[in-house]
Image (cartoon, rainbow, N blue to C red):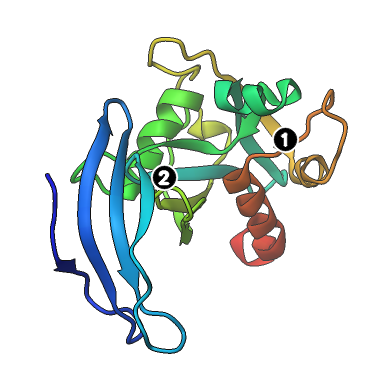
Amino acid sequence: MPLSGATSPPLAGKQVIVESQDRILDGFFAVDKALVRYELRDGTLSEPHERLVFERGDSCAVIPYDPLTREVLLVCQFRYPAYTRDPCHAWLWEALAGAQEEGELPEAVVRREAMEEAGVALSRLVYVVTVYPSPGGTSERMHLYVAPMSSASRRGPGGGVDPGEDIEVAMWRLDDALDACEGSDCHGRQIVDAKTVLLLYYLDRHWGELS
């Protein structure tokens, strides 16, 4: 529904005026088109600028880790958007992740995804950070966690429940995963997913206090 003349609450004293906003795509994902003016550094308002927002809601991700073996659990699955950019990255090793439904707590999301994707029951969750993965194009926020696990955490095979999911589950030595974040050989186990890289570096930096 078009919005006209709406003004958002000021952020750090700066003004944003949304002159119009329309949903131009409404399917599995949504795209909004807006005409926006915002306060410039000199205090004046900009000319109206058209902006597109890819709206997919928020998401949550977690990396389970074994404090006794210094290993992390990662999953691998086919990612068509990454394939279109570079066929070497058609299958990506990632943290466990899923979309946050309306009214659902982030902690519930990561526990659900851990069971569905990896067959792992998580108890204690350690909140890491909430980030915008690509704020120039999407409003999505990602709520990121790590969680201790053990062999007793395994409750099922995992593999995913949604049609088309074919998820491989593996334990990685943390040091090997960190090396894979910095590798350049696309035929090896290179890790290029942003949320996963962030969480692996967090685990490495805070391992002593986490384990």
Q: Tell me which amino acid carries mark 2.
A: Cys
Identify the residue under disc 1.
172
Pinpoint residue 81: horizontal percent, then vertical percent. 56, 26
Identify the residue under disc 2.
60
Return the residue nearer the eye: 48 or 7.
48
Pinpoint residue 20: horizontal percent, then vertical percent. 20, 55
Q: Who's the residue at 55% across and 18% down the image?
A: 167
Q: On the picture, is 168 further left or further right than 120?
A: right
Element marked by disc 2: strand
Return the residue nearer the eye: 125 or 94.
94
Quadrant in the picture for the N terminus: top left
Q: On the picture, is 197 further left or further right than 163?
A: right
* Label 1 environment density (alpha carbons within 10 Å; few <14, some 14–19, many ≥20): some
Q: Which residue lies furthest to the top in this view?
A: 163
Q: Who's the residue at 22% across and 70% down the image?
A: 8
Name the image quarter holding residue 112: top left
Residue 198 sits above or below residue 64 on the image: below
Name the image quarter holding residue 9: bottom left
Residue 38 sits above or below residue 100 on the image: below
Return the residue nearer the eye: 16 or 185.
16
